[in-house]
Each structure stands twice: as C-alpha cells, then as structure tokens.
Image: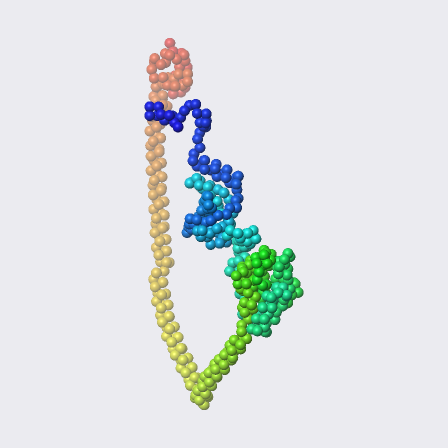
Amino acid sequence: MPRSNQGILAFPEDDKDAPHEAPWTVAQLNREVRACLEGRLGKVWVQGEISNLRRQPSGHQYFSLKDEAAQVSCVLFRSAGAGAPALRDGLKVEISGEISVYEPRGQYQIIVRRVQPRGAGELEARLRALQEKLRAEGLFEQARKKPLPPHPVRVGVVTSPAGAAIRDFLHVLRRRAPHIAVVIAPVRVQGRGAAAEIARAVSQFAEPARSGFPAVDVIVVTRGGGSLEDLWEFNEETVARAIAASAVPVISAVGHEIDFTTSDLAADVRAATPSAAAEILSSDRAETLDRLRSFLRRLHRDAGVHLAGHTARLELRTASGVFRAPLRRIGDLRQETDDLRGRAKASASSALGVLQQRADKARAILAARSPATRLASWSERLTALRHRREQAASAILRQSRQRHARHAHALELLGPRQTLARGFTITMDAQRRPLTSAEQAAREKEIVTLFADGEIKSEPV
C-alpha cells in the first residue's frame, strides 16, 4: 500500500516490483490481452446452455453460454446467423468461433461462426456448413427457380429401380395421368459413389442433345425415407450443383415429409414424398375430363350466341335500302360528294382571300419599316461624324505644334548657350561639374572656363 507523508501519497522507493517505464493505458492493456487470447487460443468449439439472449434490430444476437460452474459472453453477427437454428434461452448448443476481447469494456467473448443443437454430431455440422456455403452462393434463391410446365408429357426420374419410391410414384402417376411417359435413369441412392451417379443422371437428362438421353419436360430426383446417414448422398455438394445447373425444372422428393435435404433446397420444387411428386405432376383424370366437358359446353354456347348475333346483323343489312336500291344510294353519295366538293372549293377561296389580304398588309408594313431608309440616314450621319472627327483632329494637331514651337523657343532663350553668347562664362572642375563659388574653385587643381566659342583650362592661384 502507498505510504502517506504529510498528506502526500508516495510509493515506497525500495519496491522492487515497481515499473521502470511508462505505465500502459487501459486501452493498451485490453489490446494486449486481446492479441494474447486471439493469438494463443484462436478458434474454439464449446458446448453449453444459452441464457440472457438479446436480439438487436441490426440482426446481431448477444447471449451468454453457461454450464454448472461458469459462463462466457457470445456474439452471433447477422452474417453468421443466417443458417443458424432459432436461438432461445435454455437451448443447449454447440458453438464454434474465435476468442476475442471487446476492448471498450475489457470483456472477453466468443465471436460465434456456427451454432448447432448439442448432440447433432459432426455429420449435421458438415451438412449445415455445406448448406450455408451454397446459400451464400445463391443456389437456394427463389429468384433462380424455374416454374414447372403446366402439362408435362414426359418425365425423367432419377432413382433406384428397385426401391419403394419409384413404385409409389408410378402408382399415383398411372392412376391420375396415364398419358405421361416416364423415363427412369437407374442409380444407386445410398453408399459411396451414389452421389456422383445421381448428379451425372441429372446432368444427362438436362442435356439430351449431348448425352443421348430422351428429352423430358421435368426431372424428378427421389428415394424413400431413412436416417441422415441414409439420405446423405442427396446432401452432397455435387448433387446440389447438378440440380441447380439444370435447364430442365427439377422436383426433389427425397424421404418422408419430415426429411429435408440439400437437394430439396437446390431443386425448383420440393415434394414431401415420391407420391406427392406424382400428384404435383399430374391432375386427376376425372377432373381433367370434367374440365374438358365444361370447356366444350361453354364453346358450344358461346358459338351459338355469336352465330345468332351475326345472323341478325346480316338480316338487318340485307333488308336495308342499300341492298334493295343500290344505284339510288350511289347517286345520293355522288350528290353528297359534289356538294362537299363545292363547299370545300368555296371555303378554300375564302381562306385564300383572307391570306392574300394579310400578305398585302404585311408587305405594306415591311415597306414602311424597311431598313434601307434607316441605313441611308445612318450613312449620312456617319459621314458627317467622320468629317467632324477629321476637322477636330487637324485643329488639335495644329494647336499642339504651335504649343511645341513656343516651348522650344522659350527653352532656347533660357538655355546656357544664350547666356554664354551674352558674354558670360561657366567655370567647372576637372570632371566638368559647375563651380558656384571662388572657395570651390580654390580647392581644385585644375578648372575649366567655358566661353561661347570654346573653353580654357587653368590652375587657380
């Protein structure tokens, strides 16, 4: 503890543990702790129970993961939580993520990257990771899914020919729509290598021109129910990508209603069972016949109504005067044409007269406002201004010359040469600087006396 000396706190001078350099700031300490934790522990895989779950409007989720003895803060950002199960307080989960420190509060936490219910196992974790990857690529987007044709004629089925799924599918299809042809691509639906066979069969149905397979309207990928391990081949990435890449619509009918595989997510339509897939593709035969009979009755009724209407209109026209006396109608039309022609001619003449009057009036206005008259007046004014300018310039030049002559004569009269001509002299030193007093001349070794007709050099006495 620091000692007090007259009210001043001071650390003991003999404290060997006292730092010998500037102390860290709290921010520096938290930054160093964060670097230490992230560098040494990095990614972790932890199980526990969720508590104090808080969801933010941004989509991020904050919670504590606890067990009987301790708890740790966790954050699941929205980008990582897209494929995560719905979290709730009390849910026992396994999470993977990175250890970090939230520096503003000095709180260490786990940044969660993946969440799964406890006990789901490695297989389910792989499945979730794959589905998250494909979902991020957009393979499950609803916008890329293709609609099924309303009346398929030929269906390609990718399945085991010995399984119960194909029997259920064919039984329903033959009962409801026996006219639909079925082409089966036999594949294994379980075991190593089965996924490659399924994907290859889907691709061959999707590209009949290159594979030699018959062209089909819809592809059905199906098998019966089973455990996650039994259905695993339909969760493989190669199958999902083949289904997503198919130009032909694909129905996935794998397992029972509670089963949900990656192929179901990638397919254009998911059917709960093989029988449900057959029902989606077919409509009931009796229902189809009833609809056709209804359409036929409606066609007969509508055709009768249209025929009766057209017959009545035809009888009305044949009873009119046009058909009874066509020449009279033609004469009426000719007279009407002549009348219209005369009215058009009169109207045109009247309009032309009005336009002629307007043109004459406009011509008179233009003549009165012709620029030629104004140009002549402006030309005369310009000539007068030019003459006045020349006279003014000559007068100014004459005055300037007279003023210059007077100034030159005055300068000549006041100049030194006129003074010398009147008998005066100018005395200068050897550098030809004028001397204004005898005292100045006495100090010089040689002086120059300037007369009107020359100069004399002398020495002062």
- For residue 203, side relative to residue 302 (left or right): right
Image quarter for residue 278? bottom right
Residue 159 higher or lower than 102, as above or below: below
Residue 413, position as x, y percentages in the image: 34, 26
Which quadrant would the N terminus be assigned to in this image?
A: top left
- In this rendering, would 393 be left or right of 87? left
The answer to whether any part of residue 248 appears in the image is no
Q: Residue at x 38, y 20 (%)?
A: 452
Residue at left offset 35%, top offset 33% = 405
Is the residue 73 above or below the residue 215 in the image? above
Q: Position of residue 258 (x, y in %)?
A: 52, 61
- Residue found at the very far top of the displayed protein: 461
Q: Residue at x 37, y 68 (%)?
A: 359
| Coordinates of residue 357 in the picture (x, y in percent) | 35, 70
> Is residue 272 shown left or right of residue 409?
right
Residue farthest front in this picture = 68
Quadrant holding the C terminus: top left
Give residue 281's position: percent from left, percent from top. Answer: 55, 69
Residue 37 vertical placement versus 364 (above, below): above
Count up the numbered dots. 0
* Snapshot colouring: rainbow
Q: Nearer the viewer, residue 93 or 68?
A: 68
- The answer to which quarter of the image holds residue 244 is bottom right
Residue 127 visible (yes or no): yes
Judging depth in this view, the residue of 171 and 131 nearest the camera is 171
